[in-house]
Amino acid sequence: MAKILIIDDEESLRFTFDRFLTSKGHEVSTALSYEEAMARIGETDYDLIFADIFLEDGTGIDVLRTTRTKGFYCPVIMITGAPNVDTAMEAVRLGAFDYLPKPVTEEVLLHATGMALKFKHVMDEKERYRSNLEAIFRSIKDPIITTDKDGAVIAMNEAATKMCGLSPEAIGQKYEKLVKGCNGICADYLNEAIRKREAVDAVRIDCLPHDGPGRVVSLSAFPLLDPQRAFKGVVMVFRDETRLVNLETELKSHKQFYRLVGRSEKMQRLYSFIEVLAGRLTTVLITGETGTGKELAAEALHAGSERSTRPLVKVNCSALPENLLESELFGHVKGAFTGAIKERIGRFQKADGGTILLDEVGDLSSNIQARLLRVLQEREFERVGDSTPIKVDVRIISATNKDLREKVKMGKFREDLYYRLKVVEIEMPPLRERRDDIPLLVDHFCKNFNKEFNKSIGGVSNEAMKVFLDYAWPGNVRELEHSLEHAFVLCQGKTITLDDLPLDLLTQVRHPDPLSIATGDDGAKAILDALDKTGGNKAKAARLLGIDRVTLYRKMQKWKQ
């Protein structure tokens, strides 16, 4: 059933058309003047309009012109009792679907109606298709520009207008004339695609706009073909790779990746792995000993992702008892438990659109494990004391220094949750496996502590560095940082020496057992090495060896005899 409007000042014609069309199931409205017709058109979305050329207060041509001006594109069929070439040409020019002379028979009327409604259906489908394409076109974040076969711009999305600095007036103009403010290399690739009528790719070219920061972009130009495979133009898709290039440049510096510091091979592999994972929404489990930088790795994953503008919410799962942790993670409603005096939003809800880091995830209770599994599976949860599910879009990163495989075997950690969390695992290397990074880390922390303590310490002595390199660092980078902080507090000069280092660090540096130094034949060599490292300072040598000065003096006196 279609909605049809009949506009004619002859009552008999309105009545006849109404009767013929209503009998076919159509919903018919009538108007006897231009003014009345405009009022009805403003109220109803018609599928077809019949309009007489001559009306009391206007013409059918006026109706046709006004509907087109206001954006109503239903078919309009003109009716006239006095057909002439001028009115027919004007009607066709304005887009009239048909032009019928009076008298109009039932057969002609129904045939014209059927053809017009088929046309309307095709046009509606075409408009829906165009609207869908336009919505897709607008939603794509990468800049897109389409041109005709002469290189004139047909369409562009918002990202393209921003990148190229183009305005809506650019439509219809040659692309190569619009980009004179930059080096114009994109126009060269466009012209190549037009000339060859095949796809052209340009990887990492410099985009240098005259009024903004430079970028590095990749460009792909594809031919536009009509249904008969005839060449109609080109679609250009740009990808801004500036951030990726900057990350690679930072990575190639072999020193620092976000807040992670290290140039060793293990760290380089770690940086590359994080860079690959950052652009994906994969759930990641970060494992490693205490102090290896698991939290920093999570920060790098978030900062390198498209979610970097959204929150990174951190939760220490071992810091709170189960009932408080459940409320902390999922929130609660007022009155959910004793002390719940007001509604609270949980960490998952705060992280919506961003990332949540579940640190020490191995310490979760079985109840919290079950609730976390649901979030991973269904991306929804309920607040404590509420049964209304809340949907969240959160990337989950978990971290632990525990052996979750062993906890699974012991029945202390759910196996299904373990595999959900460990879609991809990042294993942080302990500091003892990347000793080459110790001098770099020492320098990094010295710069930070100089700012914090308002000092100008130039670094550490060779002897102190030797201790750093020999020590096993069970507390990893965090222990190194704390040891240097201790040294900065004590140091009164410009260089950190053995005297400034924590005593437990000196006594635990790998050396021969104190008993063997005091009694064994290898004691002489160990003591001589220690004296050499400490510049002959016997007190420092004794501390370095882990023996008292009396033992050291007695041993040296024995050698003299």
Image (spheres, rainbow, N blue to C red):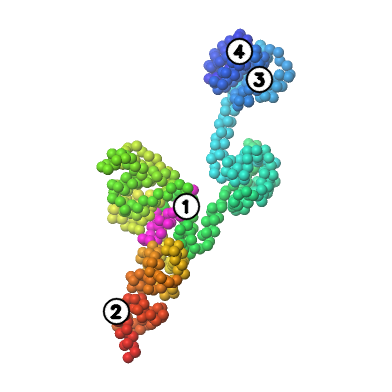
**Residue type at tag 4:** Leu
Secondary structure state at the residue bearing disc 3: helix
Is residue 5 magenta-colored? Answer: no
**Among the two numbered marks 4 and 2 on one chain, the one whose residue lies closer to the N terminus:** 4
The reply to whether discs 4 and 2 touch (Cβ–Cβ < 8 Å) is: no
The reply to whether discs 2 and 1 touch (Cβ–Cβ < 8 Å) is: no
The reply to whether discs 3 and 4 touch (Cβ–Cβ < 8 Å) is: no
Secondary structure state at the residue bearing disc 1: helix
**Among the two numbered marks 2 and 1 on one chain, the one whose residue lies closer to the N terminus:** 1
Query: 353 or 493: nearer the eye?
Result: 493
Characterize the local packing of mark 2: few (<14), some (14-19) or many (20 or more) Cα atoms within 10 angstroms.
few
Q: Is residue 261 left or right of residue 92?
A: left
For mark 2, what is the residue?
515
- Between the residue at mark 1 and the residue at mark 4, the CA separation in whole angstroms equals 67 Å
For mark 3, what is the residue?
62
The reply to whether discs 3 and 2 touch (Cβ–Cβ < 8 Å) is: no
Characterize the local packing of mark 3: few (<14), some (14-19) or many (20 or more) Cα atoms within 10 angstroms.
some
Residue at 59% from the left image edge and 17% from the top image edge: 37
**Among the two numbered marks 1 and 4 on one chain, the one whose residue lies closer to the N terminus:** 4
- Between the residue at mark 2 and the residue at mark 1, the CA separation in whole angstroms equals 52 Å
Give residue 369's position: percent from left, percent from top.
32, 48
Q: Quadrant of the C terminus?
A: bottom left
For mark 4, what is the residue?
32
The residue stretch that appears in magenta: 285-306
Is residue 294 magenta-colored? Answer: yes
- Between the residue at mark 4 and the residue at mark 2, the CA separation in whole angstroms equals 118 Å
The disc placed on residue 303 is 1
**Among the two numbered marks 3 and 1 on one chain, the one whose residue lies closer to the N terminus:** 3
The reply to whether discs 1 and 4 touch (Cβ–Cβ < 8 Å) is: no
Residue at 54% from the left image edge and 42% from the top image edge: 140
